[in-house]
Image: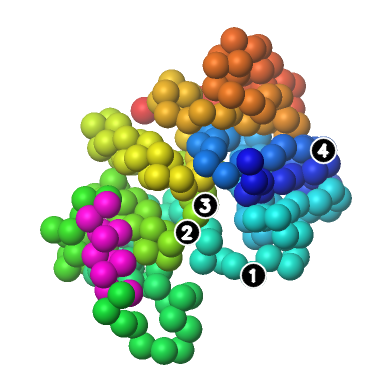
Amino acid sequence: MSSVVTVEDVSFAYGEKAAIEDISLSIDAGDFVGLIGPNGSGKTTLLHLMLGLKRPDSGSITLFGEPIDEFDDGERIGYVSQHSTDRGSTMPVTVREVVTMGRFAHVGRSPLGTDDHEIVDEALETVEITDLADRRVNQLSGGQRQRTFIARALASEADLLALDEPTVGVDAESREHFYGMLDDLNRQGITIILIEHDIDILTKHVNKVACINRELYHHGDTISFLESEALSKAYGAAHGVIEHDHP
Ligand code: ADP
Ligand code: MG
C-alpha cells in the first residue's frame, strides 16, 4: 500500500506555545481518515504541516513519497480550508468559474481545451451542482458552496482531498448527503483527510481515525478507536480545551 502522507516525529510551536508534539503517522492511498480532537488541539496545524503550508520545527514529512520540501505537484491535492464557506460568501464569481480554476494548474499558459471543459462538467455532475453552474458563489447556501470547492478539487484531478470542518453551517440533511458523496469519492480511490467535530457522523464514514490533542492519542481503524479510551483521554487532557457543544 503506497503512502500518501508520512509524518515522522513532527513538532511545531507558535512562538513558545507547542501546538504539535512528536507526532508520527502515515496515511495510505485509499484511506478515509478522520482527524479529531478538541478545539485548539492542533488539527488545523497538523493538516497544514501535512500539506506543506507550515514547516515543522523538527521531524520530517513526505507527500506522495517525496520529502515535502521537494514536492511540487500541488494539483494532486484538493484542500478546502476551515471557514472557506464564510469566505466564499463574498466571491462574485460563478460556480463554473470556481470549478474551472481547478484546471489552471494543468494547462499552464495554454488556453483551456474541450477536454478541460468536459472535466469541469463531470466534476459539477459528480457533486450534483450542474444546475447551479451559472449561479454566483455568493448566492449559494453553505452546503452548495462546499460542494463547489470539492468540485474544483475534482476538476484538478486531485487524488488527495483535505477538508477542514467542511460542513460547519450546513444543515443536517445536506451534511448527510455531503458525507455520502465523500464515501463515493473514497470508493473511487480518492484519499481523504477530514476534520469534523461531530464524532458520531465522522466515525460513521471514515475508516481510520487520528485522534490528537497536541500529541497523538490514537491512529488506526475506526473500530479500534471506538473501543479505545483515546477519545476520553484526548478530550480530558490537561492541556486541551474541552469541546463545547456545537449547535
Ligand atoms: P484546532 O484546529 O484543533 O482547533 P489549531 O491547529 O487551530 O487547533 O490550533 C492549535 C493551537 O495553536 C491552539 O492553541 C491555537 O490557539 C494555537 N494557534 C493556532 N494558530 C495560531 C497562530 N497563528 N498563532 C498563534 N497560535 C496559534
Ligand atoms: Mg481548526
Q: Residue furthest front?
A: 1
Task: Give the residue displayed 52% in from the left and 41% down from the top.
Answer: 30
Q: Distance between the residues labelled 3 and 1?
A: 14 Å
Q: Residue furthest left?
A: 131
Q: Distance between the residues labelled 1 and 2?
A: 13 Å
Q: Can residue 13 be seen in this view?
A: no
Q: Does the residue labelled 4 lie within 8 Å of ligand 1?
A: no
Q: Name the residue under label 2.
A: 158
| Element type at mark 4 | strand
| Element type at mark 1 | loop
Question: In the picture, which quadrant includes the N terminus?
Answer: top right
Callout 3 environment at 10 Å: few (<14), some (14 to 19), or many (20+)? Answer: many
Mark 1 vs mark 4: in front: 1
| Element type at mark 2 | loop
Could you say which is closer to the camera, residue 39 or residue 71?
71
Horizontal and vertical percent for residue 89? 31, 59
Say which mark, if any, is on residue 160.
Answer: 3
The amino acid at mark 3 is Leu
Question: Which region of the structure is painted magenta?
Answer: 116-126
Q: Mark 4 points at which residue?
A: 22
The amino acid at mark 1 is Asp
Horizontal and vertical percent for residue 86? 38, 54
Query: Magenta residues: mostly which secondary structure?
Result: helix
- In the rendered structure, are the residues bearing label 1 and label 2 in contact, judged by CB atoms less than 8 Å apart? no
Q: Is residue 23 left or right of residue 119?
A: right
Q: Distance between the residues labelled 1 and 4?
A: 25 Å
Callout 4 environment at 10 Å: few (<14), some (14 to 19), or many (20+)? Answer: some
Q: Mark 1 points at which residue?
A: 72
Q: Does the residue labelled 1 lie within 8 Å of ligand 1?
A: no
Examine the rendered structure and indicate whether residue 132 appears above or below residue 7.
below
Could you say which is closer to the camera, residue 32 or residue 36?
32
